[in-house]
Image (cartoon, helix red, strand yellow):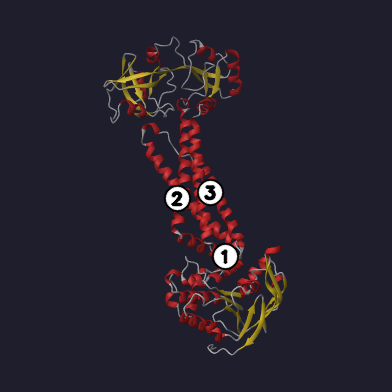
Amino acid sequence: MNAVHCQQIEKSFGSGETEVKVLRGVDFTAHQGEMTFLVGPSGCGKTTLISIIAGLLGSDSGSVELFGESIASLSSREQILFRRRHLGFVFQQYNLLPSLTAAENAAVPLFAAGMNRKAAVAKAADLLDRLGIGHRAHALPRLLSGGQQQRVALARALVHEPRLIICDEPTAALDHKSGESVMELLSNSAVHPDRAVIVVTHDNRVFHFAHRIAHMDDGVITHTESSAPTAATH
Amino acid sequence: MIALALQMLRHDGAKFLTMVLAVALAAFLTQNQASFLVAFLGMTGSQIRDVREADLWVMESDTECFDQAKPLKETAVQTVRGFEGVEWALPMLKLDTHARTESGKLSTITLIGVSEDSRVGEPKMRQGEAASIYQRDSAVIDPGGMSLLYPGEEFRPGMKIRIHDEWLELRGVSEASPPFTGFPIVHVSHATAMRLNRAESRSTTFVIGRLRSDANAADVTRRIRESTGWKALTRSEFEAASWKFYSDQGVPNLFYITITVGLIVGIAFTGQTFLMFVKENARAFTTLKVLGFTHHQLALMMTAQAALVVALGLSIGTAMVVGTTELAKSLPFFRGLYLPWQVSLACCAVIGCVTVLTAGLSFRQVLQLKPADVFRS
């Protein structure tokens, strides 16, 4: 089943002579149970596309459907609630809150959903344990290595069991070994029959984790290739 | 969620402390200066309030406050007694003169003569008996006077002060309310006051009286004014007139300036620091937006942060005011100082509202954060 279905997405920034057309009619699909990589050179429009898919940015034209629901038809509050319930994010710079412990950071989506603090932190700590970083659950982000921080970010993306996880350059700030380790964890823990994972990257060392790779250049998807992930185990 | 907000705030210890101290400073300055202002202006009516039995004050028409009174004719008492609605009336003699101790210490004093027959205006006593002032050549002095004329000394019977070449024996320390002028208040009998009143031929500074319970105060004072040309006021009117007289001299202006500076400094520091806090936490707030925090939730978080800053700042500031007020009250001149709860409440309400308002302005920054910027490294 299609988790994400984008048709003819167009997006420009600026106007008049300064107008820059970033997306020029993008068609993109991501399937449940798969990890879809969105790859391409810097400035080709990858981040703009995932921003539109996540409902963080509006498109000029075209349609985006997540699990059969049109994002554009939702009010801004409904978009926030949809995002809170169904989407998880992993960022290049981890974006952990420096004042919160690892477990508290991982529990943030549960806080947003109004879950009791103690229960939320316990659930997040349990997930951290499963991701192999339970022993650092009470550490502040500044005391964690880059790889550990990204694991916490991964736990935050998974803790509320979303149906779509969007990862923006999850290995860009990590060395090869840590990046490989994070991708393996992502592949093992995030890929699920009811869930789709979109990974934006230009780190070709981790391409072997992908089920499908969409190549993007100059605002369009040039071609999509399917592949059997070699490192993913379910 | 509120715990999350407070954790974010506490984590940035330097800014948190700056904001709390700024609010504390504003709370301290405004409450301290406002209470000083209220207490000092309240002192302008001290000697009026001290004559508890009198609710009618008649004085020469040019008199504007207790401390600047011209004497009336001797017949004034009889005239006032003749008005319908006046239950009783008595002369009160107040002199502004000088007193010197046996060691040569000199001070301007306010001398008040109390009628031996009625004992109206007799002071409450801290040490000694009030009735002792009716003995020949006797007086009692207030605590401020004791510390001015006998610095560092405790009262002991037999102490003497000289007024107009006459020695009076001090027989006690009164609880006279602290006067605005800060001069010692010396109570003597009316007869002694008359004897010491050498500079003036007239010996009635005020006619004090009581209105009958069924009398209309406004009507009685109007009739006295119209038929005599003197000023006739109820006690509260005379207190208000004294308050206004000193207010019009510009006394409150310095306090107003300090209060305003305190508010501006406190609010500017708090607002600026809160804005910096939000700016430096822009990535965190953007992340929270992306992860599904609604504007309502973010507003609640920022309100909680502002509320914590305000609560701590106001508590510290108010505690400092209470502490300094208690400390100052131990000094004789400041013994009338107090922190009226209304002043405290008003200052705290203003500072609290403005601080929350500055937090609200900072929240606009949060509203303007673009969630899509979360992907920018």
Q: Which mark is residue B41?
A: none
Q: Residues within 10 Å of mark 1 (few under 14, many from 20)?
A: many
**Discs 1 and 2 lie in a common subunit:** yes
Which residue position is annotated with label 2?
B21
Judging from the image, mark 2 belongs to the subunit labelled: B
- CA gap between label 2 and label 3 equals 14 Å
Q: Residue at x 51, y 46 (%)?
A: B348
Where on the picture, by quarter, is residue B366? Answer: bottom right
The amino acid type, in three-letter code, at marker 2 is: Leu
Counting residues from the start of the chain, the first of labels 1 and 2 encountered is 2
Image spot of residue B14 (x, y percent):
44, 56
Which residue position is annotated with label 1?
B286
Residue B320, compared with residue A182, is above or below; it is above
Left or right position of B317 against A25: left
Classify mark 1: helix, strand or loop.
helix
Residue A52, compared with residue B204, is above or below; it is below
Which residue position is annotated with label 3?
B352
The amino acid type, in three-letter code, at marker 1 is: Thr
Q: CB of mark 1 within 8 Å of CB of mark 2?
A: no
Question: Which sits in the foreground, B360 or B41?
Answer: B360
